[in-house]
Amino acid sequence: MVNSLSIIDQLASFVCELDLDHVPQAVVDEAKRCVLDTVGVIVAGQKSQLGSAAMEHSKQVYREGNSHLLGTGLTLHPIGAARVNATSGHAYDFDDTSYTGIMHGSVVVLPAALAMAEHRGVGGKCLLEAFIAGVEVEYAIAEWCTTHLYYKGWWTSAVYGPLGAAAAAARTLGLDRHATANALSIAVSHSSGMKASFGSDAKPLGMGLAASIGTESALLAAAGLTGPNQVFEGKNGFLSLFNDDQHSTDTGLQLSDKWRLTDPGILFKSFPVCSAAQAGAELAAKLLKCHQIKPSDVVKVVCEVPPLVNISLIYHDPKSIRQAQFSMPFAVGCILAYGDIKLEYFNEDVLTRAELQQQMQKVSMYVPDYLKNDATVPLRCPEGAGITITTRSQEQFDDFLDRPIGMPGNPVTDEVLEDKFRYCCRHGGVPAKRARRVAQRIWGLETIDDLNGLLD
């Protein structure tokens, strides 16, 4: 049955009507996992060079407020806090990924929801409702638009991000359906983001901009400003300009009927690099361990990857840490040189080390015909990888990994996810005892009445 409401009105109705008591428990649980993981990567990212620079800039631009810059004692107006936290959360590309539209949703939506929740003084139940509303709206639109937009060259996280952030901020503000529709349409009117940003500071900055656009759009709508209700369908609207009028004709948005947090689910990363490099790094480490291969005996590592991996990992000889985040030679080279990929490695000094450069030169990557021409690949192993290691004695060891640990179909446990959270907090300077207490509060987020002390 065709829905007679505009796309914006359908989204606004879903945002306003969402009630945590009627959301499936599995969806609520996955939302809390996303919150835990995202808070951790934000805290870690605040200590990065990019995070520090974004923080100093925003302190000059935005006035003080009630919204915390996570992991610090600083507070800003919610627009500034959302911008800094989202930028820092993507500084290491360690945040979660959704394959609906192929994007990072949590790192944009949560900073907007949390900043506005602290601004209004609401509790954890409202925050969870806002977060779920924001990511589900964003993922539903992305799925409806298909992956055409991503493959065309747009950076989906920045394009869809303002919509999700606006939905979360509007829900936290308690806007009615009419004002929520205006918040969403204002945000969509100002969406943008190019994949040309990959390998530069502009990519994580795009997450900050998306979060701040969405947050401000909600505040503008609360003040009575309006946006175009037909922003998706109209002439010169989103579908026409961004997506060449492409969208799913089989189904509508399926809001409330399908929850994208669990279907298809979320990828939680094991390594602080692009999701496209996760399988290659994990499989390289597995082969070395299982066959007791000494890295010094390795002469060549060949990576066979699907098309999605190939268009994401575009730097075969990275010249900067930002480029290294999108490089299979860097990811596998770190495994060979150090046995892991740690946040501590993301500085220019490490990139120029002789032992890492030597190992990186052994790694190559290409798309074989069996992955290029198989129609099942986008669903079966969208960012999988095959690895063949050749040793000095000309022995070869190979395997293929469809889905790395943390990907839907191969989920990471709550315990492992909390270990990652504590590691990120430690990197960000948060004491272990405090990190454990914060994790406990997030697992019980819906019972918390006051969010101001979440990291205090």
Image: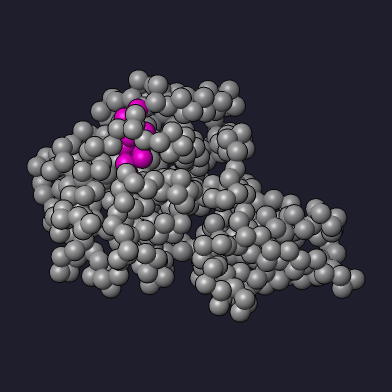
Where is residue 331 shown, x and y percent of the image?
Answer: 64, 59
Front one among 421 and 15:
15
Q: Is residue 317 visible?
A: no
Residue 154 appears left or right of 341: left
Q: Residue furthest front?
A: 1
- Placement of 22 over or under 238, stated as above or below: above
- Say which quadrant the C terminus sits in: top left
The answer to whether residue 231 is visible is yes
**Residue positioned 90% across, 71% down in the render:** 393
Residue 19 within the segment the image draws in magenta: no
Which residue is at 69% across, 63% downward? 400
- Is 255 rendered above or below residue 152? above
Q: What residue sits 74% from the left and 52% below the top?
A: 339
* Residue at (40% x, 21% y) in the render: 447
Figure quadrant of residue 157: bottom left
392 w.r.t. 257: above or below: below
Q: Is residue 127 magenta?
A: yes
Spot occupied by residue 47 in the image (x, y as percentages of width and height): 51, 41
Q: Quadrant of the N terminus?
A: bottom left
Q: Position of residue 222 (x, y in %)?
A: 14, 39
Image height of 213 relative to 237, above or below: above
Q: Which residues are magenta?
A: 125-134
